Image (tube, helix red, strand yellow):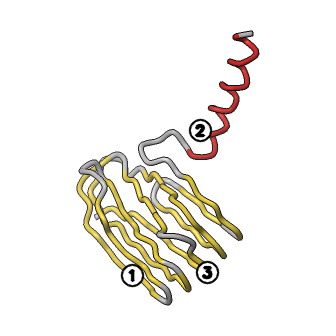
Amino acid sequence: MLKKLFVPAAAALLAVCGLTGCGKYPSGYYAVGFVHSNSSDSADMSFYSFDGTISYKLSPEGRAGRLTCSGSLEQGDLTVYYDCGEGKTRWAELSSGGEVSLSEAIPETDELYIIVETNGKCSNGELSFKEDAE
C-alpha cells in the first residue's frame, strides 16, 4: 500500500521540480508564444503573453563586470531583479508601452541570477540580458 502511494507522489514531485526548477530562485509561469535562452553570459526572452516568474543563472566565472538589460513591453507590468551574491536587488521596472536600457556594475561573483516577475499578465514583451567582463 505504501509503495502504491509513494511512487506516484515521487513522480509528481519530480515533475514539479522539472517545471519550476529547484534552484535558488525557482521559476513558475504561464506563457504563450514564449521563446527564451540562457547561456553563461547572457539570457533572452520574448513572448506574446507571460504571467509569473522566470529566473536565469549566469556564470561570470569570478570576475567583476557589467550587466546590461534592454527590452520593451506592450502591456502589463513587470519587475527585473538581480542577485550577485548580495541578495535580490530590484533593478528595473517596465510598464505598458515602456522600454528599458540599463547597465549596472557588478562585483566579482561566480553566480549571477536574473529574476523577472510580472504583476499579472503581460503581453508582447522582450528582454535581453548580457554580462560583460570589465
Q: Can you say which quadrant of the picture contains the N terminus?
A: top right
Q: Which mark is residue 101?
A: 1
Query: Could you tell me the amino acid type at mark 2?
Result: Cys
Query: What amino acid type should be assigned to the residue bearing mark 3?
Result: Asn
Q: Residues within 10 Å of mark 2 (few under 14, many from 20)?
A: few
Place residue 66 in its image quadrant. bottom left
Indicate which label's residue lies in the foreground, 3 or 1.
3
Residue 124: numbered disc: 3
Does 18 appear above or below 122? above
Q: Position of residue 38 (x, y in %)?
A: 55, 57
Sequence-wise, the earlier of marks 3 and 2 is 2
Q: Residue at x 27, y 51 (%)?
A: 87
89 relative to 11 in the view: left or right: left
Label ID, residue 23: none
Q: Position of residue 70 (x, y in %)?
A: 44, 78
Counting other residues with Cα less than 10 Å from the Cα at mark 3, is it few (<14), some (14-19), or many (20 or more)?
Answer: some
Q: Residue at x 43, y 59 (%)?
A: 115
Marks 3 and 2: CB-CB under 8 Å?
Answer: no
Q: Residue at x 34, y 77 (%)?
A: 102
Q: Quadrant of residue 37?
A: bottom right
Q: Quadrant of residue 6?
A: top right
Distance from disc 3 to disc 2, alpha carbons, whole Å, reads 28 Å
Relative to 122, is 10 above or below?
Answer: above
| Circle 2 residue | 17
Mark 3 to mark 1 CA distance (whole Å): 17 Å
Dot in front, 2 or 1? 2
Give the structural element (helix, strand or loop) at label 3.
Answer: strand
Mark closest to the chain's N terminus, 3 or 1: 1
* Residue 7 placement, left or right of 56: right
Q: What amino acid does circle 1 point to?
A: Ser
Front residue of this view, candidates 117 and 132: 117
